[in-house]
Amino acid sequence: MQKLWKEFVAFIMTGNVLMLAVAFVMGGLTKKVIDDFVQFIINPIIGAIVGKPEFNNTLKLGSGLIQYGAFINTVINLVITGFVLFMIVKAYDAYQNRKRAAGEDDSGEEPDEQVMLLRQIRDALVTRG
């Protein structure tokens, strides 16, 4: 049992699992921020334009009730969430590209032997010429 526990702890402590856990928590918090943005910012703007802050329209069909207004709210939330996440990824990519261009790539991985050799050749050529 103790060996199983040690293997489990080693698995949990690997970088990939920790990063996944952090990403999951950050994703949940980001969704909360976006939901609040939609509820407290976007919906009042929609309410000012359309007259109601939310689409809570329904359609009665026999004994069933089709809530297409709630579906419209969900689609609006999806579009805004997707756009915000897209902008976050774009900003991150731009940041990474600036770091790479400045030679500050800190991916944590050592370059392979060929890359190191090419860098030495480049440096030798620069100092020589």
Image (spheres, helix red, strand yellow):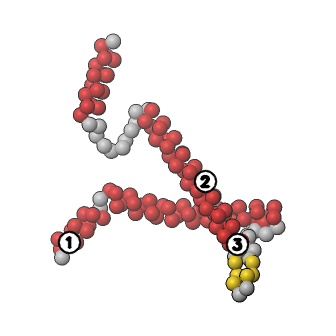
Report the quarter where the C terminus lies: top left
Residue 21: x and y, percent?
Answer: 40, 63
Kind of residue sitting beneath label 3: Tyr
Neighbour tally class for label 1: few under 14, some 14-19, many 20 plus, Cα within 10 Å: few
Kind of residue sitting beneath label 1: Leu
Kind of residue sitting beneath label 2: Phe
Q: Quadrant of residue 42?
A: bottom right
According to the picture, the residue beneath numbered tag 3 turns out to be 68
Q: Secondary structure at mark 3?
A: helix
Q: Secondary structure at mark 1?
A: helix
Separation of marks 2 and 3 at Cα, in angstroms: 23 Å
Report the quarter where the N terminus lies: bottom left
Q: Nearer the viewer, residue 58 or 112?
A: 58
Residue drawn at x 73%, y 70% as measured from the top left: 54
According to the picture, the residue beneath numbered tag 2 turns out to be 83
Choose the circle earlier in sequence order: 2 or 3: 3
Q: Which one is in front in this view, the residue at disc 2 or the one at disc 3? A: 3
Above or below, comparing residue 38 to residue 122 in the picture = below
Q: In the figure, is residue 50 to the left or right of 13? A: right
Residue 40: x and y, percent?
Answer: 69, 65
Separation of marks 3 and 1 at Cα, in angstroms: 51 Å
According to the picture, the residue beneath numbered tag 1 turns out to be 4
